[in-house]
């Protein structure tokens, strides 16, 4: 089996650990060597019966692969450039066995796709992206690197998404929408028009109406 490190022992990193277990149940492929996390390595020696390394004592052999479990695209990009790429780790794509990828699906390296994701035809995603559980990715999507789709996000057909975009849980993007670089779209938003680079989009909380007695 191939050896792999998970950068970050937080909740997202542990989700990746579970994803790897699911992949291994389908086909024995990966052995998790450990987590890499400076914060937790000072407090704990192991999580999930897996060792936690600090950045200073992590193994750096060429035959080891690595992925980043950080959901924030900016921080994830820094981990890939400064720790994973710089140290020569292999960079795999990790895809849950439940996901059916069309033959025309195009993707780079370091992409992580969790369970129950639907991906339509002619989709192109670059490097280091995370697509969480129950997302629906419409046809002809073109996305740059470091895309983050949180659970149940829906992207309509013919959309174009820029570098380091984060779409929160339950976000709905209508078809033919362009989203610029470094955009963050909050939980439950419905996007009906193009969004310029560097924009954060939120919706006001809905009012709670007290039930009449």
Image: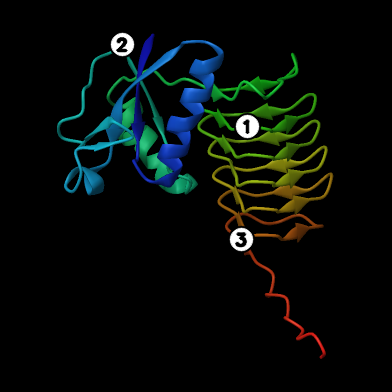
Instruction: Please tell me which residue lies in front, 198 or 146.
Output: 146
Quadrant containing the C terminus is bottom right
Q: Which mark is residue 199?
A: 3
Residue 15 point in image, percent of width and height: 47, 38
Separation of residues labelled 1 and 2 (CA atoms): 27 Å
Identify the coloring.
Answer: rainbow
Instruction: Please tell me which residue lies in front, 110 or 97.
Output: 97
Q: Residue at x 75, y 43 (%)?
A: 155
Residue 186 point in image, percent of width and height: 63, 61
Between label 1 and label 2, give the one nearer the viewer.
Answer: 1
Q: Are marks 1 and 2 in contact (CB under 8 Å)?
A: no
Between label 3 and label 2, give the one nearer the viewer.
Answer: 2
Where disc 1 sits, the SS reads loop
> N-terminal of the two: label 1 or label 2?
2
Residue 93 point in image, percent of width and height: 52, 22
Separation of residues labelled 3 and 2 (CA atoms): 40 Å
Give the labeled residue for mark 2.
Answer: 63
Give the labeled residue for mark 1.
Answer: 115
Task: Name which quarter of the figure residue 130 lies in.
Answer: top right
């Amino acid at each position: 089996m191939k050896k792999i490190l998970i950068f970050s022992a937080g909740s997202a990193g542990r989700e990746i650990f579970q994803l790897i277990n699911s992949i291994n149940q389908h086909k024995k492929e990966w052995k998790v060597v450990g987590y890499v996390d400076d914060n937790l390595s000072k407090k704990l020696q192991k999580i999930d019966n897996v060792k936690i390394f600090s950045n200073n004592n992590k193994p750096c052999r060429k035959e080891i692969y690595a992925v980043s479990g950080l959901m924030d695209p900016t921080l994830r990009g820094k981990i890939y450039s400064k720790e994973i790429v710089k140290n020569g780790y292999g960079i795999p794509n990790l895809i849950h066995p439940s996901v059916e990828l069309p033959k025309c699906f195009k993707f780079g390296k370091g992409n992580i796709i969790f369970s129950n994701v639907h991906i339509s035809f002619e989709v192109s995603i670059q490097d280091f992206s995370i697509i969480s559980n129950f997302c629906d990715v419409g046809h002809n999507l073109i996305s740059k690197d470091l895309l983050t789709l949180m659970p149940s996000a829906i992207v309509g057909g013919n959309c174009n998404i820029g570098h380091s975009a984060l779409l929160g849980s339950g976000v709905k993007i209508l078809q033919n929408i362009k989203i610029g670089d470094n955009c963050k779209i909050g939980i439950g938003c419905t996007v009906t028009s193009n969004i310029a680079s560097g924009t954060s989009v939120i919706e006001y909380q809905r009012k709670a109406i007290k039930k009449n007695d």
